[in-house]
Amino acid sequence: DQQVKQNSPSLSVQEGRISILNCDYTNSMFDYFLWYKKYPAEGPTFLISISSIKDKNEDGRFTVFLNKSAKHLSLHIVPSQPGDSAVYFCAATGETSGSRLTFGEGTQLTVNP
Amino acid sequence: DGGITQSPKYLFRKEGQNVTLSCEQNLNHDAMYWYRQDPGQGLRLIYYSQIVNDFQKGDIAEGYSVSREKKESFPLTVTSAQKNPTAFYLCATSRSAREADEQYFGPGTRLTVT
């Protein structure tokens, strides 16, 4: 039972354009969402998070949007840079999960110069 | 230099042998976690610990064991009962064991069992 799904295994964009990574969840108890970035053979690093009381959170080039009714969130990267090429994981948690995170499968983003 | 240390970076073992992966943190975080990553799959939770001397099974605990004798350390043993042990193993920590919070990850250990 995959409670967090990233349906696109890969995404390729041109440098300078927008990258949009999508994530869907099924558990209505989830109320806090995070995005992580991962380079090969390294641990993931935290990018940005959003609480269910908001529908948008912005940090520099990164913006996360949350649509609670659709149980959908997305990460926008503008402008995309070659150094953004990595695997992006979305994760979710809720009151009943404590500090446990449930991760999606990840999306490999490639930004072409 | 604060952070999470996982050693070694690469580990090779013969089938049938138990192997222990190390995870040490000096962030003074309460909670610690073990995940494995396989190609095309997300991070799957093996075990987690919210406090010293206590730990809970995650989603794929079979074939693994852990201990939490000190706040700083959360070693993972991959036993011979684990059917597919070859994977990338990640240790993580979070400040709080009770509330939603970001998790911080170590650099990972690549285990290869032949």
Image: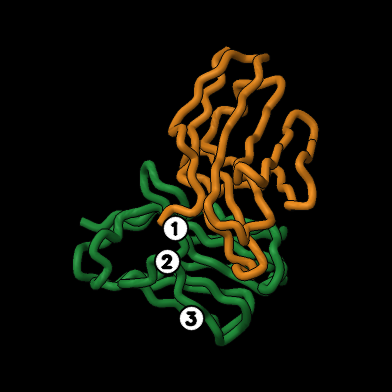
Chain colours: A orange, B green
Location of mark 1 (residue): B44
Q: Chain of mark 2?
A: B
Location of residue B89 in the rendering, given as x and y in whole percent from the top left corner? 43, 57
Nearest to the observer: residue A113 or residue B56: B56
* Mark 3 residue type: Ser
What is the C-alpha distance between the residues marked 1 and 3?
19 Å
Which dot marks residue B89? none
Quadrant where the N terminus of chain A sits is: bottom left
Q: Are marks 2 and 1 on the same chain?
A: yes
User: Few, some or many C-alpha atoms within 10 Å of disc 3 (few <14, some 14-19, many ≥20)?
Assistant: some
What is the C-alpha distance between the residues marked 2 and 1?
7 Å
Nearest to the observer: residue A68 or residue A113: A68
In-image side of B71 versus B66 (left or right): right
Nearest to the observer: residue B108 or residue A5: A5
Q: Find out whether the residues at labels 2 and 3 contact each other: C-beta distance under 8 Å.
A: no
Location of residue B110 in the rendering, given as x and y in whole percent from the top left corner? 39, 53
Mark 2, secondary structure of its residue: loop
In-image side of B44 versus B48 (left or right): left
Mark 1, secondary structure of its residue: strand
Location of mark 3 (residue): B67
Please report whichever mark, 2 or 3, sits nearer to the chain's N-terminal start.
2
Please report whichever mark, 2 or 1, sits nearer to the chain's N-terminal start.
1
Can you see residue B8?
Answer: no
Q: Chain of mark 1?
A: B
Location of residue A86 in the rendering, given as x and y in whole percent from the top left corner? 54, 33
- Numbered-mark total: 3
In-image side of A59 versus B65 (left or right): right
The residue positioned 76% from the left and 42% from the top of the image is: A55
Can you see residue A43?
Answer: yes
Above or below for A76 versus B101: above
* Mark 1 residue type: Arg
